[in-house]
């Protein structure tokens, strides 16, 4: 198979044991003033992203990356949260009927795991919903093509994406190749329309095929962040305070840093 690798056309030959791992982490942020509304938000999220919905997302991802779904395990947790784990094979892999498919499948098996983590802060009124998605593929297929679908499948206010390639394959001359596709940044695989909605930065070690991208929503439209009946009629000053609190929450998650701790250090 001829592929483009680091700007050059290269013919790949032989067994491809490259592993491409995509770790995709999103946060959905919400303001709910009362404890009742905060709990209702978590219950809404828990129902909206239960194991059945997550299983459907896994099925879509499988089709997008051209893999074959082998097995799915789902779990809804008490009181909240859900998980889905799926095993995949490369779609073009042909297994003879007489062969034990599970043995052959282990050579080319990939997996997808999704976990959800809802939480809320009674003091601030801010609730958040985190989703962790890990996709690990072997051989020719790559999870990068599913990025746009993943971002659009959730209310993604903050996104952290890690992608790295391990192992090696060989070209027609027998020389090792440690990556089998072109990439300079994870952003290469995200549409312009999606990127325009976010502030984005990268930390990449291209020589080691390690890529890291962080994204945070640019514009906060307050009505999209409010939950509960008591926030329907807010005074202008209160709206301004809530918006500021949401901006701080999003920026703290984006930077992985608590601004309150930072202020305490300065004052001391």
Image (cartoon, grey):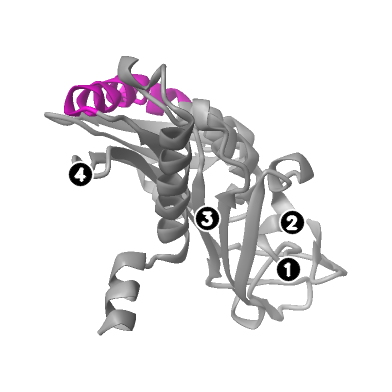
Element under disc 3:
strand
- Residue at x 54% of width, y 66% of height: 164
Q: Residues within 10 Å of mark 2 (few under 14, many from 20)?
A: few
Earlier residue among tags 3 and 2? 3
Q: Nearer the viewer, residue 101 or 127?
A: 127
Q: Which mark is residue 138?
A: 3
- Relative to 224, say whether 125 is above or below: below
Q: Which mark is residue 188?
A: 2
Q: Residues within 10 Å of mark 3 (few under 14, many from 20)?
A: many
Q: Quadrant of residue 191?
A: top right
Name the residue that disc number 4 marks.
Answer: 123
How far, Cα to Cα, is label 4 from label 1? 43 Å
Earlier residue among tags 3 and 4? 4
Which is the main secondary structure of the residues drawn in magenta? helix
Element under disc 4:
loop
Q: Nearer the viewer, mark 3 or mark 2?
A: 2
Do tag 2 and tag 1 residues touch (Cβ < 8 Å)?
yes
Q: Nearer the viewer, residue 238 or 145?
A: 238
Q: Which residues are magenta?
A: 34-56
**Quadrant of the image for the C terminus?**
bottom left
How far, Cα to Cα, is label 3 from label 4? 45 Å
Q: Is residue 240 left or right of 257 when viewed as pictured? A: right
Where is residue 113 shown, x and y percent of the image? Answer: 37, 43
């Amino acid at each position: 198979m001829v592929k483009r690798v680091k700007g050059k056309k290269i013919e790949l030959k032989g067994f491809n044991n490259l592993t491409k791992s995509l770790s995709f982490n999103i946060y959905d942020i919400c303001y709910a003033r009362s404890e009742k509304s905060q709990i209702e938000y978590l219950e809404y999220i828990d129902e909206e992203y239960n194991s059945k919905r997550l299983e459907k997302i896994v099925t879509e991802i499988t089709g997008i990356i051209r893999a074959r779904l082998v097995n799915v395990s789902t779990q809804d947790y008490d009181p909240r949260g859900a998980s889905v784990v799926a095993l995949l094979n490369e779609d073009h892999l042909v297994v003879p009927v007489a062969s034990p498919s599970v043995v052959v499948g282990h050579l080319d098996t990939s997996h997808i795991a999704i976990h959800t983590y809802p939480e809320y802060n009674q003091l601030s009124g801010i609730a958040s919903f985190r989703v962790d998605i890990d996709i690990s593929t072997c051989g020719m297929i790559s999870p990068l093509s599913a990025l746009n679908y993943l971002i659009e499948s959730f209310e993604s206010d903050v996104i952290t994406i890690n992608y790295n390639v391990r192992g090696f394959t060989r070209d027609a001359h027998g020389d090792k190749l440690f990556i089998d596709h072109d990439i300079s940044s994870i952003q290469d695989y995200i549409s312009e329309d999606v990127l325009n909605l976010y502030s984005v930065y990268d930390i990449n070690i291209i020589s080691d095929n390690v890529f890291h991208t962080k994204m945070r929503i640019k514009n906060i439209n307050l009505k999209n962040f409010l939950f509960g009946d008591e926030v329907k009629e807010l005074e202008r000053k209160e709206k301004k305070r809530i918006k500021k609190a949401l901006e701080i929450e999003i920026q703290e998650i984006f930077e992985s840093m608590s601004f309150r701790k930072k202020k305490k250090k300065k004052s001391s």
